[in-house]
């Protein structure tokens, strides 16, 4: 018998057979051809249809059990739907197979094209899904890998230290711990990083800090704390940024890198937040000699026999709880030249900034804050002197007195009550009369 090519099959007839006895496959196929012969005319004769390839090979699957047989018959067809239905109906008319009574029931007539269409749709969905979720991301990953390789290839040296390609020409740089940190910043588009090379700070860092605005970007661990301490002892950095606690800069994602750099803190702010710790670090690199007042309190004097060790600066002071009389002469208090020099230099740097610098009794800078925020900044710290770009008024004097401040230095002063706070103006620092 001829076998219908799979590509031309349109329908598949599936039937169930039950026989009252033992029959074999040739008996069933013979019954199909023999008992349908002449039923539908010569145009639908099964033998002729199979010879011309319009009916395919009839397949039979039979099982015998307890003296009876049951099985399945499949017949592929390339006829149209109505002719295939007629063939299926004709097969149900078979009543005997071999010597046994039998019954055949059509279970279904399947349109193979529907199954093919379903397969095509499912396959198209899978292909599209792979294009969208696999092919495109893969090309993006390749592109990003190429960019990263280019960035890594751009790593250079600046002052004999591993650095990004823009470190030499940039006005501001980012100090990181090691080469791996520089590479990670390069991967994320930051090209002005310089590595300090671990907790041992190289001397080149001093020159870099002197020439450029520097932000130090440290790991969020104890190693980062140690590097910060050493940097404070050696240099004057401008900003500090830290990786999240327990993480290192080299393992941060792009989002984490930029978030940490956006949240960098100025050194002035850090000094205010951690007054005692930063004062301790800074004292280790800058020893301040005791003031004359401290020497007098201890019953000693720093003056040699022939006169004072330092030139003194005279400032009009006053008695507490009294108001100035216009014609009353002011008494003067001698202030060490060291104080006058620090106040004068600090006030010169503050001109036009509307800011204030706060010092302790050793003239260590505790912090720099906006002049309008002085009152809030004095809480909880031991401020000894305040230098501000602004007018020293009554309210500021009262705030300073309440917080134990000894010196207030400003560009000008209002008419004030007598107070224990020593008020110095810019004119007095410059030696002008009447200030």
Image: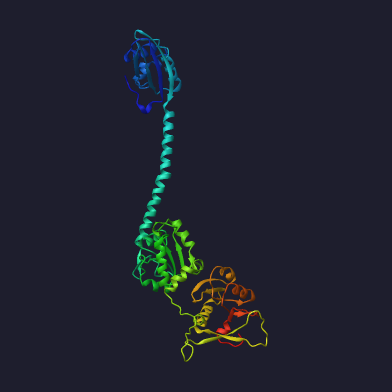
* Colouring style: rainbow
- Quadrant showing the N terminus: top left
Image-based side of 324 in relation to 131, left or right: right
Q: Which residue reaches farthest top?
A: 99
Q: Which residue reaches farthest bottom?
A: 306
Report whether residue 154 is seen: no
The quarter of the picture where residue 94 lies is: top left
Seen in the picture, residue 271 relative to 47 is either above or below; the reply is below
Report whether residue 12 is seen: yes
The quarter of the picture where residue 112 lies is: top left
Seen in the picture, residue 61 relative to 236 is either above or below; the reply is above
Q: Is residue 213 or residue 101 the one in the foreground? A: 213
Image-based side of 400 in relation to 295, left or right: right
User: Could you tell me residue 430's position as x and y percent?
Assistant: 55, 85
Q: Which residue reaches farthest front?
A: 299
- Quadrant showing the C terminus: bottom right
Residue drawn at (39%, 56%), measured in percent from left and top?
251
User: Could you tell me residue 54's position as x and y percent?
Assistant: 38, 22
Q: Is residue 275 or residue 244 the one in the foreground? A: 275
Residue drawn at (40%, 45%), measured in percent from left and top?
134
Seen in the picture, residue 271 relative to 141 is either above or below; the reply is below
User: Could you tell me residue 201's position as x and y percent?
Assistant: 37, 69
User: Could you tell me residue 264's position as x and y percent?
Assistant: 48, 64
Q: Is residue 201 or residue 291 the one in the foreground? A: 291
């Amino acid at each position: 018998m001829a076998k219908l090519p799979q590509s031309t099959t349109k329908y598949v007839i599936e039937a169930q057979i039950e026989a009252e006895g033992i029959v074999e496959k040739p008996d069933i196929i013979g019954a199909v051809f023999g008992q349908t012969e002449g039923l539908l005319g010569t145009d639908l004769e099964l033998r002729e249809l199979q010879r011309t390839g319009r009916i395919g090979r009839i397949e039979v699957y039979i099982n015998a059990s307890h003296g009876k047989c049951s099985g399945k018959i499949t017949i592929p067809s390339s006829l149209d739907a109505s002719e295939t239905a007629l063939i299926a109906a004709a097969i149900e008319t078979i009543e005997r197979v071999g010597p046994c009574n039998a019954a055949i029931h059509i279970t279904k007539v399947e349109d193979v094209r529907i199954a093919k269409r379903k397969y095509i749709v499912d396959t198209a969905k899978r292909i599209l899904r792979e294009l969208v979720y696999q092919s495109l991301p893969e090309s993006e990953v390749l592109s990003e890998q190429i960019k990263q390789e280019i960035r890594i290839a751009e790593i250079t040296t600046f002052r004999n230290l591993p650095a990004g390609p823009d470190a030499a020409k940039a006005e501001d740089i980012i100090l990181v711990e090691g080469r791996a940190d520089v590479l990670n910043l390069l991967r994320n588009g930051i090209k002005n990083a310089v590595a300090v090379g671990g907790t041992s700070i190289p001397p080149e860092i001093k020159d870099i800090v002197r020439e450029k605005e520097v932000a130090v970007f440290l790991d969020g661990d104890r190693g980062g704390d140690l590097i910060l301490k050493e940097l404070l002892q050696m240099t004057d950095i401008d900003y500090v940024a830290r990786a999240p606690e327990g993480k290192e800069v080299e393992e941060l994602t792009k989002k984490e890198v930029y978030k940490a750099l956006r949240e960098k803190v100025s050194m002035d702010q850090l000094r205010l937040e951690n007054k005692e710790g930063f004062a301790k670090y800074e004292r280790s690199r800058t020893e301040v000699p005791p003031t004359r007042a401290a020497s007098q309190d201890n019953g000693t004097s720093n003056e040699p026999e022939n006169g004072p060790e330092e030139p003194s600066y005279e400032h009009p002071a006053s008695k507490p709880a009294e108001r100035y009389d216009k014609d009353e002469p002011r008494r003067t208090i001698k202030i060490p030249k060291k104080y006058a020099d620090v106040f004068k230099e600090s006030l010169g740097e503050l001109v036009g900034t509307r800011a204030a610098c706060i010092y302790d009794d050793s003239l260590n800078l505790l912090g720099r804050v906006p002049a309008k925020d002085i009152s809030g900044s004095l809480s909880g710290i031991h401020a000894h002197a305040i230098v501000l770009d602004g007018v020293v008024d009554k309210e500021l004097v009262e705030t300073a007195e309440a917080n134990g401040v000894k010196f207030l230095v400003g560009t000008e002063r209002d008419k004030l009550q007598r107070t224990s706070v020593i008020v110095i103006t810019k004119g007095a620092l410059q030696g002008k009369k009447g200030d």
